[in-house]
Amino acid sequence: MSSLGEPTRRRRVLDPVERVSEVVFGVLMALSFTGALSVATAGREEVRTMMLTALGCNLAWGLTDAVMYLVGTAVERSRKLALLRKVIEAKAAEEAHRLIAGALPERLAAGAGPGALEALRRQLIAAPLPRSGIHGEDYAAALEVFGLVVLATFPVVIPFVFFQETALALRVSNALAVATLFAGGYILGRHAEGSPWRFGLAMAGIGAVLVAAIIALGG
């Protein structure tokens, strides 16, 4: 019943899908800057400007993502609490059953009979109301969102620090970006209990297509 009440054990960190999503976003944003760099004409000053711009952009987007994570968490928690109160205050058990069924996943709702819905209603009424607002673990998760987006910049831009030749730095940067995207897909594959290698290759391919689209659209 995580749709209505707080789970028994709250997670303190982002789940694998959220983590990978933030890293992929950060990598793609950084790639949109390195991909627009001209190998033929870019000097060290242009490279330096690109690196600072990519880092600044990901700092800004990381902060935005973190704030919106907190906003989304507060809104979703408030919505669940309001729904839970409606269940508790329902004048008829049938009305509470309807609310509970509406909060359940479709297949679970279809298979839940009146007995199961009534058992859930009694359990929800007996349990203490969950806390509203934003909690300490939410700020920790938002900080993780910020950190992941910012850290994802470095595999893409760090080669330009160590290699003076722009073409070589760009090749190494692209290789590290693809490796990072592959690793993200691999983690998602394991989380989905699918084929990690297939997910990794798919993520790397999708990332290549997305960054090409970002550059083409002037991103």
Image (cartoon, rainbow, N blue to C red):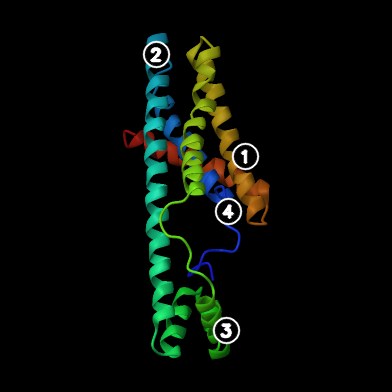
Residue at screen point 37% across, 23% down: 53
SS of the residue at dot 4? loop
Q: Along the polypeptide, which appears first: circle 3 or circle 2? A: 2
Q: Along the polypeptide, which appears first: circle 4 or circle 3? A: 4
SS of the residue at dot 2? loop
Q: Disc 2 residue type?
A: Ala
SS of the residue at dot 1? helix
Q: Disc 3 residue type?
A: Ala
What residue did someone put label 1 on? 183
Judged by depth in the image, the label closer to the viewer, 2 or 1, is: 1
Q: Nearer the viewer, residue 118 or 85?
A: 85
Q: Disc 1 residue type?
A: Ala
Q: CA distance from mark 3 to mark 1?
A: 43 Å
Residue at screen point 39% across, 54% down: 72
What residue did someone put label 3 on? 119
Residue 59 point in image, percent of width and height: 40, 31
Q: Along the polypeptide, which appears first: circle 2 or circle 4? A: 4
Residue at screen point 52% across, 26% down: 154
What residue did someone put label 4 on? 11
Q: Nearer the viewer, residue 129 or 74?
A: 129
Q: Disc 4 residue type?
A: Arg
The quarter of the displayed image where residue 200 is located: top right
Tag shown at residue 84: none
What residue did someone put label 2 on? 42
Q: Along the polypeptide, which appears first: circle 1 or circle 4? A: 4
Are dots 2 and 4 in contact, CB under 8 Å? no
Residue 136 point in image, percent of width and height: 49, 47
Q: Residues within 10 Å of mark 4 (few under 14, many from 20)?
A: few
Residue 180 point in image, percent of width and height: 58, 35
Residue 117 point in image, percent of width and height: 53, 84
